[in-house]
Amino acid sequence: MPIYHQLGKLPQKKHIVYESPSGGMYWEELYSTLGFSGIYSTLYHVNPPTRYREIKEINHRLIEPWADAPVQPYHFFTNRVEHGGDIVSGRRCFMYNDDVTLSTASFTELDDRFYRNSQADEILFVHRGEGELHSPYGVLTFTQGDYLVVPRGVMIRLEHVSADNRFFIIESFSPIETPKRFRNEFGQLLEHAPYCERDIKRPAFREPIVNKDPQRLVIKRRNLFYEYELDHHPFDVVGWDGYLYPWAFNIHEYIPSVAKIHLPPPVHQVFQSAGFVVCNFVPRLFDWHPQAIPAPYFHQNVDSDEVLYYVEGDFMSRKGIEMGSITLHPGDVPHGPQPGKIEASIGKKEVYEYAVMVDTFKPLLMTQQVPPVMDRAYHKSWLP
Ligand SMILES: [Fe+2]
């Protein structure tokens, strides 16, 4: 996140001796992107962050491909999948490609393991629940509606998570960023952006945890998981500063754009990455042209697969949707509102809906999680 943030105590300059009160030294670590050319942070540890005892592979895969999934519109009910599990087993992945995986999770057995996705940024959208995201950067308290943005390589642990929790998780193999067209050349969000820096939640300071008890770290690398045994507690940071750290933005703070006639989804964008965009639909007033049609027109974006995760409210263009439903409309065929929905939208003044949209630039592939919970008649639901 391109906002400078600083917590704890720092030496006057980088790369100089930083003495600890006990007469020892704190250990500097650079956490950097794009080699030494991207945004970065600098942390100061009580113990060197490089001490591992044992490393072993965990016998678990996030993606179980559905190899012969037909190319068609999909609607499936993620709430009807049996959820539960820990930081490794808790995710149910429904779709994926080279750029992204899309999963849901309800964690029931979070333990004391730390988790690091070494290859992907993650957005954990908090559909239900609250808790704390701990990392070397401090504590990010989260609540319903938060997008928790965790850059790749950041070690996290979810703590004090409420029992009734549900996350929609977007794993991105390129960086998650604020949309470029909402920023000036210095990275500051523009006046017409749908959110501003004041809406960004940043970590709060936590006193360094210093102990030499063995600790377990799960590292996710693409579809593989490894467990590392560390020889000390990794949240031993006395201070850090920089631009790279976990942050959060709440969907309820999003200011929607509205117009006299229908505006397309890009006005509802919330994040960008190299492989997809994330947009969100939030409660808003409808178009005010006397003959306006608030529902979207039929459309076919041939270079995008369009995913919607339904969060709350009445979704104006779809029938039969449950909270936690996901629809996928591949770029191969046109899509739009189901019969009667266009006519029903005419004259409506406002809509109450929350949904998260992911538009990918490469086709999505399906996993074995989908067939048991899919609406098998969905692709026929536009017939009269
Ligand atoms: Fe669409």
Image: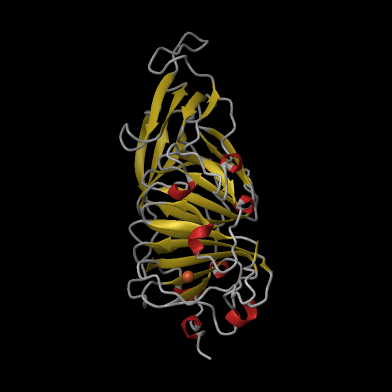
Q: Position of residue 249 (x, y in %)?
A: 57, 46
Examine the rendering and report whether any part of residue 138 can be seen.
Answer: yes
Examine the rendering and report whether any part of residue 48 can be seen.
Answer: no
| Quarter-of-image position of residue 329 | bottom left
Total numbered circles: 0
Query: Which residue of the protein is positioned furthest toward the top in this rendering?
Result: 23
Q: Position of residue 72 (x, y in %)?
A: 40, 78
In this picture, is 50 found above or below 118? above
Q: Nearer the viewer, residue 327 or 103?
A: 327
- Colour approach in the figure: secondary structure
Q: Where is residue 308 in the image (x, y as percent from the top left)?
A: 51, 66
Q: Where is residue 204 in the image (x, y as percent from the top left)?
A: 59, 32
- Residue at left 57%, top 41%? 200
| Quarter-of-image position of residue 259 | bottom right
Query: Which residue of the protein is positioned furthest toward the left in this rendering?
Result: 35
Residue 128 relative to residue 112: left or right? right
In this picture, is 101 found above or below 9? below
- Residue at left 38%, top 61%? 63
Q: Nearer the viewer, residue 136 or 279?
A: 279
| Quarter-of-image position of residue 106 | bottom right
Q: Which of 166 and 189 is in front in this view?
A: 189
Query: Which residue of the protein is positioned furthest toward the bottom in this rendering?
Result: 384
In this picture, is 346 found above or below 87? below
- Residue at left 45%, top 17%? 26
